[in-house]
Image (cartoon, rainbow, N blue to C red):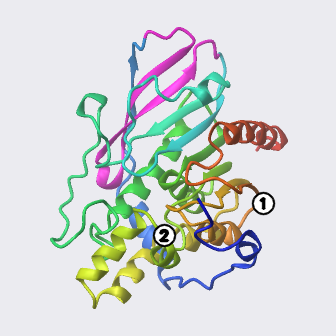
């Protein structure tokens, strides 16, 4: 495997001038205030585990539609905990309740959001996306409603993600001043968007973030999902300007300057799915204090378990350094 994008020195220098819609803030204000968040529900789940309590979560997302998830809590916790809200990678749903236990095992509350339309198993409580989308899309999610920001699939997903961060802050088992958002790939892009749109988030950990610098991703990514947009524009040759205008409202690199929480990024220099230059675009434009871990010889898997260790140490330092509000 070789470099498929810019060198590390070139990535450090890569600072694109991205198009920012004039109504970006108004668009998201209108989107996020269109519906008042409904009451979240938490139903205990018997997983057979003794050291972690798990709850099946339902939170009102976009248009008040139910979005599922899991909440994990250390069994012996007797006071409000810092919380990690996790968003998932492309094509992944919340899965089985025992699959992701790292953060709860480390003493955090851990809230996982199912991604609407992407869950793989009805048995695991998949969240549907009931909205129709125009004919002519290509397989996947990136081109659903892509000709109009109001109809675009990720308008709904990002709204869901904001609602999960807000719900975490309101849960009685959570210290609302210490809520972090994180995710790998698609989840990393969603975490950046939430940090930009939800100023009460206290920390953000975007891991090889997708949904960043769309135009460059479309130009250089060797593997899906960015290639879905290429396939769409092969069919609809006259829609390029329209498509990239829509994407600019959801681009994590466009939204990043609005985020101010401390951030820990990771980037993999041989990433064929989320080219490193696109992740650097989001990193360079990020509005808050930030750190970066670079995995020079890794593809889209990035730092995996090694990076989890980095995240845990960084988050403990970050939350310990914060003074009470």
Residue closest to the eye, 279 or 176: 279
Q: Is residue 173 visible?
A: no
Q: Is 45 located above or below residue 239 in the figure?
A: above
Q: Is residue 141 left or right of residue 300?
A: left
Secondary structure under tag 2 reads loop
Q: The magenta stretch spans which residues?
A: 48-77
Magenta segment, principal secondary structure? strand
Does residue 131 belong to the magenta stretch? no
> At 71% across and 54% down in the image, what residue appears?
263
Residue 260: x, y in percent?
70, 61
Corner quadrant of residue 97:
top left
> At 57% across and 83% down in the image, what residue appears?
18
Q: Is residue 139 visible?
A: yes
How busy is the neighbourhood of tag 2: few (under 14 within 10 Å), some, or many (20 plus)? many
Residue 163: x, y in percent?
45, 48
Residue marked by disc 1 = 289
Residue closest to the eye, 250 or 260: 250
> At 47% across and 79% down in the image, what residue appears?
219
> At 28% across and 81% down in the image, what residue appears?
234
Q: Is residue 318 left or right of residue 27?
A: right
**Cα separation between marks 1 and 2:** 28 Å
Secondary structure under tag 1 reads loop
Residue marked by disc 2 = 221
How busy is the neighbourhood of tag 1: few (under 14 within 10 Å), some, or many (20 plus)? few
Q: Is 14 located above or below residue 159 in the figure?
A: below
Corner quadrant of residue 113:
top left
């Amino acid at each position: 495997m070789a470099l498929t994008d810019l060198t590390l020195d070139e990535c450090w220098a890569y600072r694109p001038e991205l198009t920012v819609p004039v109504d970006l803030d108004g668009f998201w204000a209108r989107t996020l205030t269109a519906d008042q968040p409904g009451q979240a529900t938490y139903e205990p789940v018997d997983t057979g585990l003794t050291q972690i309590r798990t709850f099946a979560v339902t939170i009102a997302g976009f248009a008040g539609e139910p979005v599922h998830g899991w909440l994990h809590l250390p069994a012996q916790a007797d006071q409000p905990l810092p919380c990690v809200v996790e968003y998932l990678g492309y094509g992944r749903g919340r899965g089985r309740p025992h699959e992701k236990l790292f953060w709860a095992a480390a003493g955090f509350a851990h809230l996982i959001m199912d991604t609407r339309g992407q869950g793989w198993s009805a048995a695991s409580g998949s969240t549907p996306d009931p909205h129709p989308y125009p004919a002519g899309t290509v397989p996947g999610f990136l081109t659903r409603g892509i000709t109009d920001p109001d109809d675009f699939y990720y308008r709904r997903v990002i709204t869901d993600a904001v609602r999960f961060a807000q719900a975490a802050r309101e849960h009685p088992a959570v210290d609302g001043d210490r809520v972090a958002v994180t995710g790998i790939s698609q989840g990393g892009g969603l975490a950046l968007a939430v940090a930009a749109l939800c100023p009460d988030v206290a920390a953000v950990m975007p891991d090889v973030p997708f949904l960043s610098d769309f135009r460059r991703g479309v130009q250089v990514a060797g593997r899906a999902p960015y290639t879905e947009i290429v396939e769409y524009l092969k069919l609809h040759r006259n829609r390029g300007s329209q498509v990239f205008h829509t994407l600019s409202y959801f681009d994590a690199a466009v939204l990043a300057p609005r985020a101010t929480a401390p951030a820990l990024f990771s980037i993999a220099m041989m990433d064929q799915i989320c080219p490193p230059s696109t992740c650097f675009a989001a990193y360079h434009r990020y509005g808050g204090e930030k750190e970066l871990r670079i995995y020079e010889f890794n593809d889209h898997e990035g730092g995996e378990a090694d990076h989890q260790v980095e995240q845990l140490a960084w988050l403990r330092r970050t939350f310990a350094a914060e003074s009470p509000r």
